[in-house]
Image (tube, grey):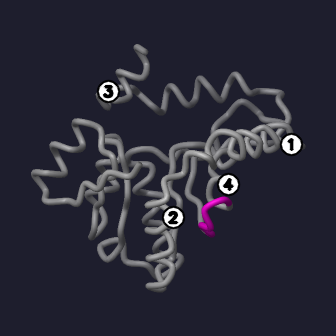
Amino acid sequence: MYWQALYKLAVLDMDAVFTRLVEDLRGDSEAEMIAKCEIWYRDHVAPQVAPAALVAIEHHRRAGHLIVLATGSTQYAARPVAQGVGIEHILSSELEVEAGVFTGRPAAFCFGHHKVTLAERWAARHGVELSASYFYSDSYNDLPMLERVGTAIAVNPDARLLRHARRRGWATPRWA
């Protein structure tokens, strides 16, 4: 509860936390992580995906938008989610792997200003203007990314993000 409260207040040093968590994976099998995350998605995430999220994804697809899942989670958690909801592109935190085994070091972090940097690089490679892009989030921790795009949408926002979204005039839909 303590760590969750710090995260919600956006005062947790996520770089340090992520680095510490990744250290605990040193020596673990990448293949096992992939398998575990696929089971986790199938059993726990897929049944909870909000129908409105799928509608929004399809709306953007039909509009010809490139759709990207940008998450602080690792590529192992992000990949089955993206595949399950039909998203082709992923920006995520990444773990360093050598010979199929985790080294215990992060390779990339996709949180806060890091997420913006990764998104800017991705957008430049794909000819996308972030100022003409959409970004959906429920967390105040994504404020740097929400501020960077043209259309910010605070879905089921935490209290702090809701206050900020209202001041900025952002949409705040509730997805079941």
Q: Nearer the viewer, mark 2 or mark 1?
A: 2
Q: Earlier in the sequence, mark 2 or mark 1?
A: 1
Magenta segment boundaries in residue numbering? 84-88
Q: Residues within 10 Å of mark 3 (few under 14, many from 20)?
A: few
Q: Which mark is residue 54?
A: 2
Q: Earlier in the sequence, mark 3 or mark 4?
A: 3
Q: CA distance from mark 2 to mark 3?
A: 31 Å
Residue 172 in picture, x, y percent from top left:
25, 54
Task: Tell me the quarter of the image containing the N terminus.
Answer: top left
Q: Secondary structure at mark 1?
A: helix
The kind of residue on which mark 4 rests is Arg
Q: CA distance from mark 2 to mark 1?
A: 29 Å
* Residue furthest top as drawn: 2
Residue 151 in picture, x, y percent from top left:
28, 68
Q: Residue at x 23, y 60 (%)?
A: 171
Q: Earlier in the sequence, mark 4 or mark 2?
A: 2
Give left or right: position of 61 versus 20: left
Q: Residues within 10 Å of mark 4 (few under 14, many from 20)?
A: many
